[in-house]
Image: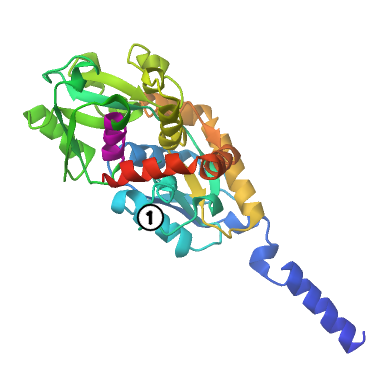
Amino acid sequence: MPIDLFRRGLLGLFALGLCDPALAQSPADFYKGQTVTIILSSAPGGGYDAVARTLAQHLPKHIPGNPTVVVKNMAGAGGIVAANFLYNVAPKDGLTIGGLQNNVPFEPLFGTKEANFDPTKFNWLGTPSQETAILTVWHTAPVDNWQQAKTTELTMGSSGQNSTPSFYGRLLQETLGLKLKIIVGYESQTHAFLAMERGELNGYPSVFYNSIAATKPTWIKEGKVKFLVQMAGEKLQEIKDVPFLMDLITKEDDKKLVAAAVAPLTAGRPYLMPPGVPADRVAAMRKAFADTFADKEFLAEGEKRMLGVNAPRDGKALQELLEHIYTTTPQEQVERLQKIQSGK
């Protein structure tokens, strides 16, 4: 073969990626004998952690090549530390998965300067659930409904000024005029719950129903807490008697604001791969997640542990949700969201 033709052929192979053994592998060949790491943006012991570790037990049998799956916690800045790592630092070979708190993909929209990532460029894999946040008070709190909270001040705990509980607390102040005094500095929801039991706090601005059902089921059964308002993309039937925020809103602008504000709850407990992962590995992992979310053993364990993993969305749906919110939310509502997020 003439030398120039050989060189052209070689260049063509490089252009197609066929000379790179890793790229030439099928997903099954690539993942066989490997370890996939889920970088989880929350601390050990909470609801996100419980779901991730349950997922790690059942996911391997649905991934081609059946790799081992492990969970590594990377808490910090309400999940932004992990998101920045996944976007800017994490390997793009398909061996790293991210599990984020659902507020994190929307932090750039909310104007959080520390969020150095474009959520629309992540490869979204899916979520096993959608969340419902509930304005929750201890049974001794001096109110029994949200209307009374418009005239009686309630002390509410939260981890930080820009955290999800603070955000939803301020959203309720903005849209319903509730008198919520948000006290920040609690290390976690668990610490705030202890403060509620001690009488230091009246409640918590946004408890996820799935989390409280999994970690404090007796509180619900024994009436230890009162649910005042539920916030979500749609009303949760398990607590159908709890007022639904969207039903309480009368102003059209406020309805648009709430629709954008609750989008993170619709995202549930989202999982992703970094940008730049080969498309066939993303496709294989998306299918693996969808198959796991439909796995009877996974669902049975989720029900036994009260993890609320019975409302999945696939990766394509998550991708479309994020792109829709980022491209269609009116600028005036974006500015209101940013103001609510900053607390200024």
| Secondary structure, magenta segment, majority class | helix
Residue 8 lies left or right of residue 274; in this view the side is right
Which residue is at the front of the view, 107 or 207? Answer: 107
Q: Around disc 1, counting alpha carbons within 10 Å, would you say few (fewer than 14), some (14 to 19), or many (20 or more)?
A: many
The image shows residue 170 at horizontal and vertical percentages of 27, 35
User: Hey, what amino acid is under mark 1?
Assistant: Ala
Number of numbered labels in the structure image = 1
Furthest residue toward bottom: 3
Residue at 55% across / 54% down in the picture?
121
Which residue is at the front of the view, 282 or 322? Answer: 322
Q: Is residue 174 above or below residue 77?
A: above
Q: Which residues are magenta?
A: 164-173
Q: Give yes or no for residue 87 being in the magenta stretch.
A: no
Residue at 21% across / 42% down in the picture?
188
Residue at 47% across / 31% down in the picture?
298
Which residue is at the front of the view, 327 or 210? Answer: 327
Q: Is residue 43 visible?
A: no
Q: Which residue is mark 1?
A: 82
Q: Write down the quadrant of residue 171 in the picture.
A: top left
Which residue is at the front of the view, 8 or 79? Answer: 79
